[in-house]
Amino acid sequence: MVSVRRRPCYAARRANGIATNMLHRTPALRRLALACTFAVAASLQGCATVTGVVTGAFTGFVDLPSEIVRTQDMKTDAASTWGIVILAAPVGFGLGPLFAFVKGVALDVSAASGTLTLHDEFGTYGRASVWRPFSYDWQPKR
């Protein structure tokens, strides 16, 4: 028995979308789309969004347990502190990029509007720092 390779019907090919097919066909369009994406990301003043997503897993691994310990005032009880660290660190590692993305967008908007400096975003470990993805209550400058 000879197997015959069948082409997908026109509707199935059309469902993929014209832009997707064109990007796969022409490397020049693919490069242009990539360049436009990088240009938009670079036009944001601090690029905290990109930095937050890239480093969010590692900073979330540290920041979520420390935020829980700090807000629940469990610094005196070592056993519960280690329990929180052991349970919350993997959750912070998994959710860190998502929270860092959202915080990065907020920080970029704050920096673009002039209510926050780039030093506050990247140069410190304060509440408004991109390195603390689970801290959301920073004070803008006046």
Image (cartoon, rainbow, N blue to C red):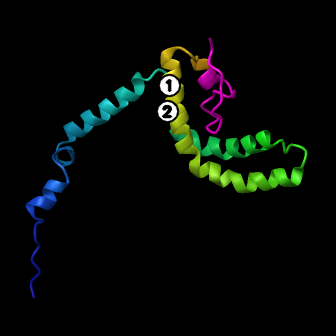
Magenta residue span = 120-142
Residue 53 pos. (x, y %): 51, 40
- As drawn, the label of residue 49 is 2
Q: Quadrant of the C terminus?
A: top right
- Tell me the residue at 58%/45% (across/down): 96
The three-letter amino acid code for the residue at tag 1 is: Asp
Q: List the single residue furthest toward the right.
A: 76
At mark 1, the secondary structure is helix
> Mark 1 and 2 residues: CB-CB less than 8 Å, in contact?
yes
Q: For mark 1, what is the residue?
A: 108
* Tag 2: amino acid: Thr
Could you say where residue 35 lies in the image, as x and y percent from the top left? 31, 31
Location of the N terminus (image quadrant): bottom left
Farthest top residue? 142
Residue depicted at 56% across the width and 41% down the height: 99
> Which comes sooner in the sequence, label 1 or label 2?
2
Q: Mark 1: few, some, or many residues within 10 Å (few <14, many ≥20)? A: many
Instruction: State left or right for residue 81 relative to residue 21.
Output: right
